[in-house]
Image (cartoon, rainbow, N blue to C red):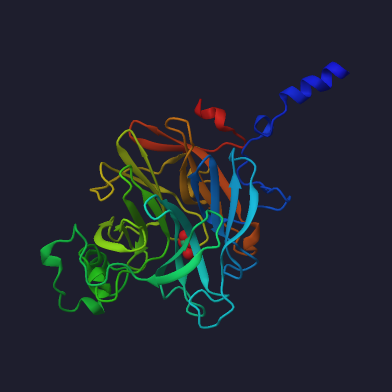
Amino acid sequence: MKKFSLLLLTLWSPALFAQFTPGEIWPDNNGRHINAHGGGILYRNGTYYWYGEIKGTHSTAEVGVSVYSSKDLYSWKDEGVALQVSGDPASEITKGCVIERPKVIYNTKTKKYVMWFHLELKGQGYNAARTALAVSDSPTGPFEYQKSLRPNPGIWPQNFREEWKKPVPGEDTLKWWTPGWYKAVKEGLFVRRDLKGGQMARDMTLYVDDDGTAYHIYSAEDNLTLNIAELSSDYQRFTGKYITLAPAGHNEAPAVFKQDGWYYLITSGCTGWDPNAARSFRARSVLGPWEALKNPCVGEGAGLTFHSQSTFILPVAGKKNAFIFMADRWKPRNHIDGRYIWLPVKVVNGQPVIEWKDKWDLSVFD
Ligand code: GAL
């Protein structure tokens, strides 16, 4: 008996029994389902920090952005509210606004933790289409709200043709979703429309390249076109350098990773909280050109991304070519019950591939 319990004790470690169970309730250290939707992860000094939308029944921001910490990726400690909504009705992040897809990166020069997120102003539906900035000295916050904006006003994308810079007579009256309208969107209709005030910015992610340059990737042009925009060296401004990706392609929920000199991007189509088939792209440089690949999901459920939508791709620290595809299984009738779909993503002949697993652990990467 004594020998047996000793054996158990030696064998026991949280990581040993830990596993990912996509789509199930995921309790934190307090036994509560993790509340970090549309999230992203920052790895720093041996700790993972998971930031996400704190949801209640509804999708509006009543509390703010959460942060959880973990050493092993299986067990997560609730570190509280990283960014709190404001009680001031005049604030852009007043309670009841929309805060989505927060992402945090660390700036080694300023030593600041920099959070960008998608902000919709209270009571305006999804019309504001702005990206917003908050910064902190600590990974767990409190993050201080700075500003919101539409990126790059008055600046053309780098990959925009000269002949597209002039309006085409009658373009404002084109009927939406007709072939002529699609063609016009591909040829910059909405870039021209939004040039003065800056491009719309909804679903988003951040990506820090090997040289420390950070990029903000967001759905612009009424979600029809993705923009990839360079951030300044302190990560708190847009430099004006940006490209359009898949114009009129309707991509949302961008998530990026890099393997063997290729940048891979996984996105979703645009069907609100309902799932659709994921897409993928690859490029040799973040600013393109990007080549469209296939749906990265394979097997049963692949047509609806296993009933989820991408949010982030996490490189596992200390393991080569080990990436976790993170996605949300939204529950629009009761958002707090939204589930997390984490699955390994591997590259097979230049194509990201994701397969469903009921249960798995990090040993798949060994
Ligand atoms: C989704 C988007 C979410 C949220 C939702 C609102 O397509 O990815 O972040 O904006 O629409 O309906």
Q: Is residue 121 above or below residue 272?
A: below
Q: Residue at x 50, y 29 (%)?
A: 365
Where is residue 188 shown, x and y percent of the image?
A: 22, 66
* Front-most of residues 79 and 199: 79
* Front-most of residues 257 and 163: 257
Q: Is residue 21 above or below residue 179?
A: above
Q: Residue at x 87, y 18 (%)?
A: 2
Where is residue 346 shown, x and y percent of the image?
A: 43, 34
Residue farthest right in this picture: 1
Give the quarter of the image for residue 154.
bottom left
Where is residue 71 shown, x and y percent of the image?
A: 59, 40
Where is residue 270 shown, x and y percent of the image?
A: 42, 60
Total marks drawn? 0
Image quarter hosting the N terminus:
top right
Is residue 181 found left or right of 38 in the rendered image? Answer: left
Q: Residue at x 27, y 67 (%)?
A: 152
Is any atom of residue 97 visible in this view? yes
Residue farthest left in this picture: 163
Is residue 351 found left or right of 103 in the rendered image? Answer: left
Is residue 166 found left or right of 188 in the rendered image? Answer: left
Q: Is residue 193 above or below residue 228?
A: below
* Front-most of residues 167 and 59: 59
Residue farthest bottom in this picture: 90
* Front-most of residues 104 and 137: 137
Is any atom of residue 307 visible in this view? no
Q: Residue at x 84, y 16 (%)?
A: 3
